[in-house]
């Protein structure tokens, strides 16, 4: 009975194995979930569809990165000549030259402000607030030039400083007085500087130089609008106070912390 029972167990298992379909024939059975049937053909179609979608995404975005193949190509375009920049990438000669021109604008504005500082610091003029304001403005414009020089080097361009023009050294004006005359000149300079910056910004856009556009927008354009507003207010205030005693009060305001701005 025991042997018989044992053989009947084997027989029984063997019979049951015959009842279970093979893997190939059972695939549709096991792939059938809650009435949804996935045939091999459908799975194959899904893989092809995904692959073509990926290829399309790569084509559209152009951001797929194949490190080993692409590095080989990139190595070929890196300059080997010692005078050529290694960092330069998608930076046009036009943008490089325009940035050098803008550096010159900043230096020239700085130079004029420095001349204004020297005028208002004279012993027979002695408007110390205006002297302080123009000295700080001169330093600020020079800093702008330096930031642009640093950026020029970052992009692999070459800084070429150009000639500066000799600024005025006298700022008195019979009709307006020296303070208003100098401040109106300062406003004109800031407006011109802004126009040059906007031209440079347009050129960067035309050259699809997004990084230069970003540099100009994030570092200069906002501050330029603020400077124009501040100096416009100074011009308006000086027009109100005239040439006499009011100028001394205005100068004291600049000297003691610019409370009206
Ligand atoms: Fe500037």
Image (cartoon, grey):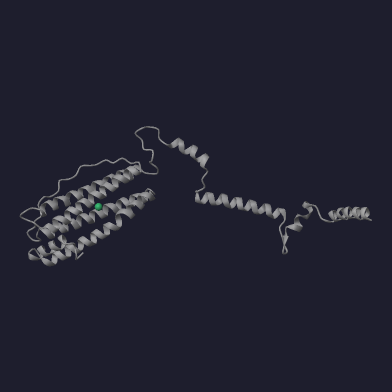
Percent of width and height locating residue 184: 16, 58
Q: Which of 229 and 139 is in front in this view?
A: 139
Residue 228 placement, left or right of 131: right
| Figure disc tally | 0
Q: Which of 176 and 81 is in front in this view?
A: 81
Tell which residue pokes out farthest to the top in this image. 81
In the image, residue 36 sits, relative to residue 102, either above or below, namely: below
Taking the spot 75% from the left edge, 55% from the top edge, the residue there is: 27
Percent of width and height locating residue 187: 19, 58
Percent of width and height locating residue 90: 40, 44
Residue 74 placement, left or right of 32: left
Q: Quadrant of the C terminus?
A: bottom left
Residue 200 placement, left or right of 163: right
Q: In which quarter of the image is the N terminus?
A: bottom right
Task: Tell me where residue 172 sits by quadrant.
Answer: bottom left
Q: Which of 52 and 20 is in front in this view?
A: 20
Percent of width and height locating residue 144: 26, 50
Q: Nearer the viewer, residue 122 or 195?
A: 122
In the image, residue 131 sits, relative to residue 240, either above or below, namely: above
Tell which residue pokes out farthest to the bottom in this image. 240
Tell which residue pokes out farthest to the left in this image. 124
Taking the spot 20% from the left edge, 48% from the top edge, the residue there is: 108
Residue 188 placement, left or right of 36: left
């Amino acid at each position: 009975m025991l042997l018989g029972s044992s053989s009947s167990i084997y027989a029984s298992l063997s019979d049951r194995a015959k009842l279970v379909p093979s893997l190939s024939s059972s695939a549709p059975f096991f792939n059938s979930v809650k009435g949804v049937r996935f045939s091999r053909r459908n799975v194959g179609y899904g893989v092809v569809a995904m692959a073509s979608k990926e290829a399309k995404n790569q084509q559209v975005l152009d951001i797929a990165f194949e490190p080993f193949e692409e590095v080989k190509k990139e190595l070929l375009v890196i300059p080997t000549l010692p005078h050529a920049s290694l960092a330069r990438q998608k930076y046009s000669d036009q943008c490089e030259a325009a940035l050098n021109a803008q550096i010159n604008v900043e230096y020239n504005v700085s130079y004029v402000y420095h001349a204004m500082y020297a005028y208002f610091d004279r012993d027979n003029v002695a408007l110390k607030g205006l002297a302080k304001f123009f000295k700080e403005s001169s330093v600020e414009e020079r800093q702008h030039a330096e930031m642009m020089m640093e950026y020029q080097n970052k992009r692999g361009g070459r800084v070429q400083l150009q000639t500066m023009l000799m600024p005025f050294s006298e700022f008195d004006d019979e009709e307006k007085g020296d303070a208003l005359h100098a401040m109106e000149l300062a406003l004109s300079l800031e407006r011109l500087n802004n126009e040059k910056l906007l031209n440079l910004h347009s050129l960067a856009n035309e050259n699809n130089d997004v990084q230069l556009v970003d540099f100009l927008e994030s570092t200069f354009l906002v501050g330029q609008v603020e400077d124009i507003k501040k100096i416009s207010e100074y011009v308006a205030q000086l027009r109100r106070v005239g040439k006499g005693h009011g100028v001394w009060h205005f100068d004291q305001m600049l000297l003691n912390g610019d409370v009206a701005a």
